[in-house]
Amino acid sequence: MMFSARRVAVPAFVSAPIVICVLMMFGVFSAHAVPQPPSLSRTDAPLDGAWQFHRGVAPHAQEAAFDDSAWDPVKLPHTWNAKDGEDGGGKYYRGVGWYRTHYTPPANLAGRRLLLQFDAASLAASVYVNGALVGEHRGGFAAFRFDVTEALHVGADNVIAVKVDNAKADIIPLEGDFTVFGGLYRMAHVISTDAVHIRTDDFGSDGVFLTPAHVTSDAADLKILTEVRNDSPAARDVTVKTTVFDAQDHMVTSLAKRLIAPAGVSTDVVQDTVLKKPRLWDGAADPYLYHAVVELRAGDRVIDSVREPLGFRSYAVSPETGFSLNGKYLDLHGVNKHQDGLDQGWAVADAQQDADFALIKELGANIVRLSHYQHSQHTLDLCDKLGIVTWAEIPLIDVFEKNDRFADNVRQQLTELIKQNYNHPAICFWSLSNELGGQAAPLLASLDKTAHTLDPSRLTVLASNRYDYDPINFQTDVLGYNRYFGWYYRRTTDLAAWADRFHARYPLTPFGITEYGAGASVAFHGDEPQPIDHTEEYQAVYHETAWSVMSERPYLWCKLVWNMFDFAVDARKEGDHAGRNDKGLVTYDRRTRKDAFYFYKANWSKEPTVYITGRRYDNRFGAKRTIKVYSSAARVNLVVNGADLGDRTSEDHVFEWRDALMNAGANTVVASATIDDKKISDIVTWQVPPRLPDGGYTITDGATYLRLDAPKTGRRAGAQIREWRADAANNQIWNLTAVADGSYTIQNADSGFYLSAAQIQGNWTLVQQRAAAGPQTWRIEPAIFGSRLVNQPSGMILDNVNGFLTTEGMGVTFIPTRDDGRAGWTLQPALPLDAAGNAIKSNPENSGETQ
């Protein structure tokens, strides 16, 4: 069974009178005439000047005479959660914010129809002009327009006031593992049109819908539906002219239809044509774009026009062989993406999105899931131009309500998503929900019907984390699964057995993996990485394993990493930064590509790649280490401190050299490969501290400056270890004895017991253990504060503060992750002890002390 686009004569959302036209062909593919720019029939003035902003309730702020001089000056785009929405704690402001600005329409707009457009307002907006309410919108991601012809005074000063509210309400998303940034976080505009115009009040759409069908490299059908609105008091004689241009702005074909537009209504005009030998939109291989200019003419005068992207492609999804584009198999691999940026929230500039997609392109991704809501038009334009297959989604997440008002809001946001983005060739999938629970199958079935009514040419999809048999999984054309084997549960390799089992049980259901990932801080590292430890090393190993499982299963129609970038989740506390999900392949500030980024680049991109991993894991102890390289080459050579360690070959683009010798001090490592007859190299310099000599050390908490202590209760085996003030007695001294490369036993100099780990009542607790029982060993690794002590048997990490300072100090425990940046210790040589356990002071002559 193959799931492909449905073919219909007219998009099924048409409800207005229809005029089917016989087309007049004015151009062919060999035409070279460059079109003249259309008349300035429709104007668009961005409201990008000064706005006044107030966070909080402001009675009477909608009134024109209201004094806003004490408010904060801002410019759009703007959010009031740029800081508190990403700083952790989950208490960012969710409530009302007010915006006010002044606008004077130029005199030449007199007699024209005026509209006020907002590209997005989160989550609900009430818009006032000169004190009068002109409209309200419920939904934080779609554009919306209000007719302000009567409210705006041409040639005079006008006050525009907007009340925005991002508080939780019966507006989706009700829940979601991301910060809901409030504000006017996209641009605002004043648009003017003639009284007869291409419709502007159809759920924020452009009023033009282009539907390619029966697409092959030999020919393609094209249906153009244009909604013509006549707001004048009498019928008007107009012509709809549609011109298709190629990527070089050469006219390909031109179609015209005359009609008498009835007064006070919208009329749907349908034009059909066949294009011979179209150049196909072929994804990243050849993202060829045409565009269509639709003009509304009164005689020889252009009274309105819009320009729309146009691409010709066909695609299908098979439950056995996955995704195909233009009749050819395409391994869909890519990323999920949120729209926020560090210290910007959702109020990101187009230039930031350009930079984001440059990184996505560098990675070699050929699909992007725009999670979990409608993204900007600029983002969709980038997907079109870069050839990135796109999954577009509404924010129906986790939970839902069983009432008409809620269902109406969901349906409204789905309609806006489809109608506003209908002409983007990159979009192949309309997603109805993410991880929705409960008895939601009837709602999803209804939404699926709505989506196919609005757009029969595309496939519907949802992302599920439900049980295999849940009815939710079978309400759309194709299915995506969010699966985190090896991170939140079980082992990464268990993904294979689950996927094979689901495929065997439901062989007619096409499904892919829409989320998989592991968190990583570029400050956290370890030689023995474990799940949930947030080390860069574990994230890399996780993705190596997950990709090896998925790449062997062509029935998985998509494979989408969660996430391309770290992003804000104010309620989270993990990794090295509260308020952040760190599963991104790139850091939140976009400055650092994590190791896993280069694993995928080596596998996905055609760009030659050689990359030495662990480059930020510096100043670690140990003379031997494993060096790992990612490369798109088949053979890689490694040189360490001038010594050639030889070549390695690999089919999975992962190359390893074990037991590479490091010297104390600086070590230069060079990996190189020949790709397309060109030598590509990567160089890393690692610092290796001298090995800690055997002897006594103080172990000090790098955050609190308290020292690891064995109080009176620590003089018996099994007692818990504490932290104590740095002026305590000799029992703060611990003897380190090297037993292996980078591994030590740690013995309390006072009691003779060894630092070790035991599980007492389910909690990892420090205890003492006699040498006769076999001392445990500890690896010493770099940390944010000093060094990290990692228990060898368990992989658990010595944590610091556990409770309140008492007469016996502060309890010390273990943590299974590196998500607490304070879990670092400073090891300093202590004074030697005499036979009685007392400190031996240095000779004053040698120490420089005076008596």
Image (cartoon, helix red, strand yellow):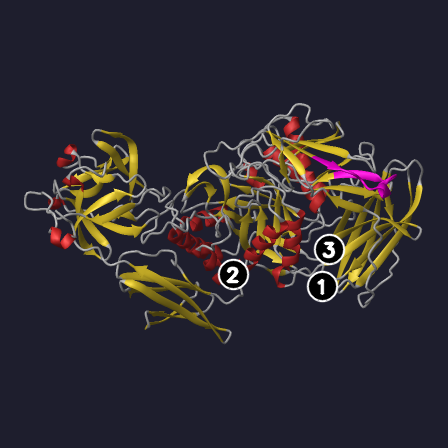
In the picture of the structure, the residue carrying the numbered disc 2 is 604
Q: From the viewer's perspective, is 223 left or right of 600?
A: right
> Which of the 4 image quadrants contains residue 448?
top right
Is residue 1 at all visible to an observer of this figure?
no
Residue 314: mark in rendering: none
Position above or below: 397 against 216: above
Q: Residue furthest top?
A: 59
Position above or below: 531 against 385: above
In the picture of the structure, the residue carrying the numbered disc 1 is 279
Instruction: Look at discs 3 and 1 and give the one toward the viewer.
Output: 3
- Give the residues drawn in magenta, as a range: 101-116
Which numbered disc, 3 or 1, marks the residue that appears first in the sequence?
Answer: 1
Q: Amino acid at mark 3?
A: Leu
State yes or no: discs 2 and 3 in contact (Cβ < 8 Å).
no
Q: Secondary structure at mark 3?
A: strand
Q: From the viewer's perspective, is 346 left or right of 692?
A: right
Which numbered disc, 2 or 1, marks the residue that appears first in the sequence?
Answer: 1
State yes or no: discs 2 and 1 in contact (Cβ < 8 Å).
no
Q: From the viewer's perspective, is 499 left or right of 338?
A: left
